[in-house]
Image (cartoon, coloured by chain):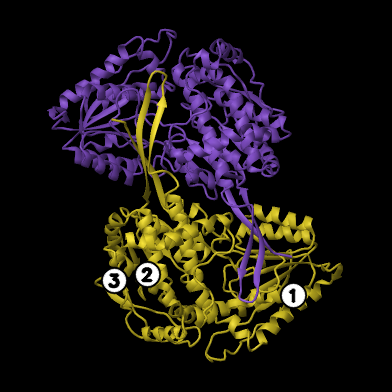
Chain colours: A purple, B yellow
Amino acid sequence: MNNLKEKHQASLDAAIKALHERTFYSIFPENPSPEIYGENADKEGREKYKNTLNKNFAELLQESPENWVGQEESPYTQEKLGVKYPFFSPETLINRAEAAFHQWRKVSPSDRAALLVESLERLRSRFFEIGYATMHTTGQAFMMSFQASGPHAADRALEAVATGLEEQTRYPEQASWEKPMGKYSLRLNKTWKAVPKGIALVIGCSTFPTWNTVPGMYASLVTGNPVIVKPHPKAVLPIAIIVAEVQKVLQENGLDPNICQLAVDADDRLIAKELAENPKVKVIDYTGGTEFGNYLENLPGKIVFTEKAGVNSIILDSMNDLDKVAQNLAFSLTLYSGQMCTAPQNFFIPETGVNVNGEIVPYETVAQKLADAVTALVNNPKAGPHVLGAIQNPLTENRVKDMASIKGRSVLDSCQVQNPMFHEARTCSPVIYEVNATDKEVYSKELFGPIALLIKTRNTDESIELAKEMAMEHGAISCGAYTTDPETKERIMDEMSLAGTPVSFNLTGGIYVNQNAGFSDFHVTGGNPAGNASITNPEFLIKRFTWVGFREPVA
Amino acid sequence: MNNLKEKHQASLDAAIKALHERTFYSIFPENPSPEIYGENADKEGREKYKNTLNKNFAELLQESPENWVGQEESPYTQEKLGVKYPFFSPETLINRAEAAFHQWRKVSPSDRAALLVESLERLRSRFFEIGYATMHTTGQAFMMSFQASGPHAADRALEAVATGLEEQTRYPEQASWEKPMGKYSLRLNKTWKAVPKGIALVIGCSTFPTWNTVPGMYASLVTGNPVIVKPHPKAVLPIAIIVAEVQKVLQENGLDPNICQLAVDADDRLIAKELAENPKVKVIDYTGGTEFGNYLENLPGKIVFTEKAGVNSIILDSMNDLDKVAQNLAFSLTLYSGQMCTAPQNFFIPETGVNVNGEIVPYETVAQKLADAVTALVNNPKAGPHVLGAIQNPLTENRVKDMASIKGRSVLDSCQVQNPMFHEARTCSPVIYEVNATDKEVYSKELFGPIALLIKTRNTDESIELAKEMAMEHGAISCGAYTTDPETKERIMDEMSLAGTPVSFNLTGGIYVNQNAGFSDFHVTGGNPAGNASITNPEFLIKRFTWVGFREPVA
């Protein structure tokens, strides 16, 4: 392991520095270009992906499977992937994790960090394969699949490792304590240990199977907790590849691969609750729906980190260029058909219109510009299908259809968008509905998928008040605001800060409210019902271990 | 406030440095000597205390009391103190805190820290008065009352302020983020705010009314949360003085004194639950019994920090000097009649005896030496009464009497110990009972007060196993162990670390397992059922605020 420590020391030092500068930092290039990843990287990755289909996933180092299970299917081809994963009962998983715990907790934080960075480095050569696996489980377009599940996820994992290493080395391992008592001194030798909590469980989601899993997984690992990764049954392959790489690094370094186990649901047996309720499971990370998240948060005796649902707002007050704003927002709405926890849903627009460069543009014009921008993007054959991707879950498609029955005026209907490569792809362009500010029952819940609500308010004050209320009561992960007035900007910052919601102001061009950058943007603040975790603030790491002190008089 | 910032910058810098060195650090001298605190400090403090008796406590800047209430009585004189405090209904307290919140949250963390250090500095001249107030509410002997409620509490408060300042300034207020995109760059200006959670409530206990209250109180204040301090109705005066000093500093600096309110129960109306359950209360600190602590921990939507009950163990394996060990433990048991959360209760001793300098000393001899050491200390007229102090709560006295009916052999009976100054003092020397390792129902709960159990084990392995089990299942705040064997020491550290319990090894002479030093010893680890808080690790501060980020393209 000393080798690995030397090899990765510079990366870890730079990562810790980046945490505190919060300027742009990334060590895994997001551009899938041949110059960076190699001439044949794309082709080889695609072939590797294809070669995993319709067979047992044999890479994991977990012995004696009790069964082989799998139920993934591609939103692009509507066909089953046919990959089968080893199944283990919760008892087996817990027993193996318990045994591995006593080995892993004795590895020093710096050794653990080096091993984990090594695993991330090895993923570089598998980013394309992970990208195709993500595409055909989540429905993301390839570019997003590659970036989100590959380099962006690896950066986020490194961020968790760096934060964990820093937190565990923030206090001295030992100190000489000498208290002057007048004629003599009391002298104690003191030592401290960062003691891991125990077995950790990470429950993944179907739309971002690695990006939303690796922060908790690497955070628990770097703090000495063995991890059981329980992916969503419809999105296993991307994270299975990552778990396999971690296991290989562990085994090569003489450690038990069960320090990091993959726990796949059987087709007829969901194991998340059984695992979560096991008294030996001390730490849980979860991404997914609110109901299950609340259930987990209320389990006694657990440290639980959640990212649940929220209703994200856009506040439109004033701007210099309405067309650019509409284009930016249309992209945010259309990207991966709105299947992102950061996608905007509620657009608050004053019924009196918005101020564009000093002129009042009526509400109706703003609404129409937004609808037109979405239509133009969706119908652009070179962009539309590649921004939209496909719909992961048929329920999302149904939700879009059901919108027709809500209280509100339809501003833009949804349509299928032909994918040039996959004619069977499940696609769905954004719908836009207009509702009144009084129709809270419509817009006070997350409508996951490509659904936008234009909410007519009396004025920007009401827009801010409602956006704040939604975030405080129903959660929010992002907020976009457009204003050229410094006082309004200050008020939005102040009010949304009380709702624990980050705000992106006046975004146009190639940067979107949906995007959160590792080492700079805290993802989820932990300050509203959208989730109690923040990736990655110190709390995300320090709750995973306990500082315990020992002391003895100097001999 | 700029004045105060300059005035206290050096103290805060030194305190932050001390947090990370964890060597001895204190800025408030614990020695109540005339050379340090002034020739007449003691006399004046005692007179000031006496002058507060039997009248309304008029120092607080909280307007329009709804009533005047108070029910304190001295464990030394058995007489009522007669101090009356202003009573406010929970609605009034919450409304005032809510209004104060919007002022306090806008004061910068460094200004808040400076104001709070100023309040601590002003307490210096009131330590004697606070000491006498503590003595006559808690029953502590004067030396402990002075030290624990005065300088030690102020050091702990400073520790919380320093930690809070460091945590809130750990990330930059702003950064320029520039992401290279090949031909161009994406450039964002980013800012971050540490946003306080909201109204904080601190619920105090009857035995350490300031030491256990000020860490949470100052931690919430430094992070921008207005605080409602709800002391135990039997121990109000010591903390009332501190709240009054904080209010004066706030008012002198143009701030609302209701940023820090005292909330005293009426004689016929306990207000803790009503305050705790109010949805506007977001942060709660609590010291006291397990049942109420668990109730608070399970309130939805609150950040709760607890210090509850635990069963602290002593493991006796091997030593060089049994007499010195017995004297040290006798002092730990006798100090404030065991009414400390860190006092030892369960003494695990192998039935085969302990190894003293290579010779096996039989169990019975060890038990007798302990009993003799307690008897000698208690009966020493120059030491006994001043170590024991008085019994705060008559229930504690009853608990000692009730021990006569437990399953187990009496090794030492309790007796009243005449206090030379207060003939009516409620006193009670330690009892020692012997129980078998199998009698878990006896020793698996906290027996608050001067009660020791000698638990006969098969061997040290069983002692360790039981001490660990007690800590994991019932909580522990301290553990003392005596061993000269490095392997045994290592095993004790390892096992007790998994139970989140700090261990003091081989203490003899003038340092005791009960004592925890600010800036060095984390008090409570948060890693077992004795409490989820640790004073003061970063978690104790960072859960009181939310990091919220804002970003905007560079113009």
Give the quadrant of the N terminus of chain A.
top right
Q: Is residue B40 above or below residue B190?
A: below
Q: Which of B440 and B446 is in front in this view?
A: B446
Q: Which mark is residue A197?
A: none
Give the labeled residue for mark 2: B243
Q: Residues within 10 Å of mark 1 (few under 14, many from 20)?
A: some
Q: Residue B324 carries which label?
A: 1
User: Which of disc 3 and disc 2 is earlier in sequence?
Assistant: 3
Q: Which amino acid does label 1 sit on?
A: Lys
Label 1: which secondary element: helix
Taking A276 as reference, is B510 left or right?
right
- Position of residue A304 measured from the top left corner of the image (x, y, whole percent): 51, 44
Q: Distance between the residues labelled 2 and 1?
A: 42 Å
Q: Is residue B120 visible?
A: yes
Q: Can residue A262 be seen in this view?
A: no
User: Which of disc 3 and disc 1 is earlier in sequence?
Assistant: 3
Q: Residue B61 carries which label?
A: 3
2 and 1 marks on the same chain: yes
Q: Is residue B42 above or below residue B149?
A: below
